[in-house]
């Protein structure tokens, strides 16, 4: 997993969710078109090589799957039921034929008749595994940037995302400053 995309959400399907960044605000779309999707799938290790250019429909499908996963994750956090339409999207893609290994005589290659759809199948399968117990209990949303992630720490007490913008650090600095300004105003810390 390399390239300009960050894969820090703890599961591949939540990394897809993270391709819409800044969810606490205006949002930052990182899948703006077929080339972004192609690059993301290659970076994620989900693409057969050479991967044919995805279509606009593939991009729309990837975004629809992404938002369904996000809504289901929010439902898990709210202990609310998931929407039937979102489950249909997840289950529909998961039922699609995924990438399969083929033996060349020397080694294996990954093949699919419809490579992008096969990648979405793998992502949907990962999403279902992430959204179902026991992993579902480890889904978190960063209180700073609203990024959804899977807490893979041993203790399961991770609160902040591990983004390069350093959400956990920023919050610590802020509470430290608030403490200092309270004590300089004569208040108790
Ligand atoms: Zn964050």
Image (tube, rainbow, N blue to C red):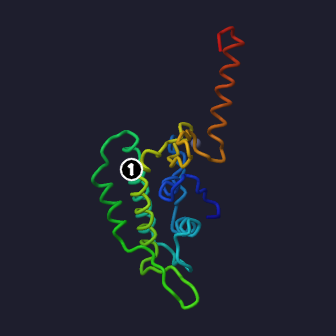
Mark 1 near ligand 1 (CB under 8 Å)?
no
Question: Residue 144 appears in which quarter of the rendering?
Answer: top right
Residue located at (33% from left, 54% from top)? 86
**Relative horizontal placement of residue 86, taking residue 62 as reference (left or right):** left
Q: Quadrant of the C terminus?
A: top right
Report how many numbered discs are placed on residues in the image: 1
Vertical arrangement, residue 31 with respect to residue 139, above or below: below
Instruction: Name the spot of residue 125 as percent of width and height, x first.
Output: 40, 63
Residue located at (58% from left, 89% from top)? 106
Vertical arrangement, residue 137 with respect to residue 31, above or below: above
Frontmost residue, 60 versus 66: 66
Q: Which residue in the structure is indicated by mark 1?
A: 133
The outermost residue toward the top is 186
Q: Quadrant of the N terminus?
A: bottom right
**Relative horizontal placement of residue 95, taking residue 142 as reference (left or right):** left
Instruction: Name the spot of residue 170 as percent of width and height, x first.
Output: 65, 35
Instruction: Name the spot of residue 141 as percent of width and height, x first.
Output: 50, 42
Instruction: Name the spot of residue 87 as percent of width and height, x first.
Output: 31, 56
- Local packing at callout 1 (Cα closer than 10 Å; few below 14, some 14-19, many 20+) is few
**Relative horizontal placement of residue 159, taking residue 132 as reference (left or right):** right
**Relative horizontal placement of residue 176, taking residue 148 as reference (left or right):** right
Ligand 1 resides in the quarter of the picture at top right
The outermost residue toward the bottom is 105
Q: Secondary structure at mark 1?
A: loop
Residue located at (46% from left, 69% from top)? 119
Vertical arrangement, residue 100 with respect to residue 129, above or below: below
Vertical arrangement, residue 93 with respect to residue 85, above or below: below
The outermost residue toward the left is 84
């Amino acid at each position: 997993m390399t390239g300009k995309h960050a894969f820090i959400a703890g599961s591949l399907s939540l990394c897809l969710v993270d391709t819409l960044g800044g969810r606490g605000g205006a949002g930052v779309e990182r899948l703006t078109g077929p080339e972004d999707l192609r690059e993301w799938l290659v970076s994620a290790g989900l693409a057969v090589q050479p991967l044919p250019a995805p279509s606009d429909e593939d991009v729309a499908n990837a975004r629809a799957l992404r938002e369904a996963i996000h809504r289901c994750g929010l439902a898990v956090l709210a202990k609310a039921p998931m929407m039937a339409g979102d489950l249909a999207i997840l289950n529909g893609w998961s039922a699609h034929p995924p990438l399969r290994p083929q033996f060349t005589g020397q080694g294996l290659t990954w093949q699919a008749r419809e490579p992008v759809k096969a990648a979405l199948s793998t992502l949907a399968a990962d999403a279902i595994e992430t959204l179902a117990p026991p992993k579902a209990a480890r889904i978190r949303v960063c209180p700073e940037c609203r990024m959804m992630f899977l807490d893979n720490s041993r203790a399961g007490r991770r609160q902040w995302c591990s983004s390069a913008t350093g959400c956990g650090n920023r919050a610590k600095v802020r509470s430290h400053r608030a403490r200092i300004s309270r004590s300089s105003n004569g208040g108790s810390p």
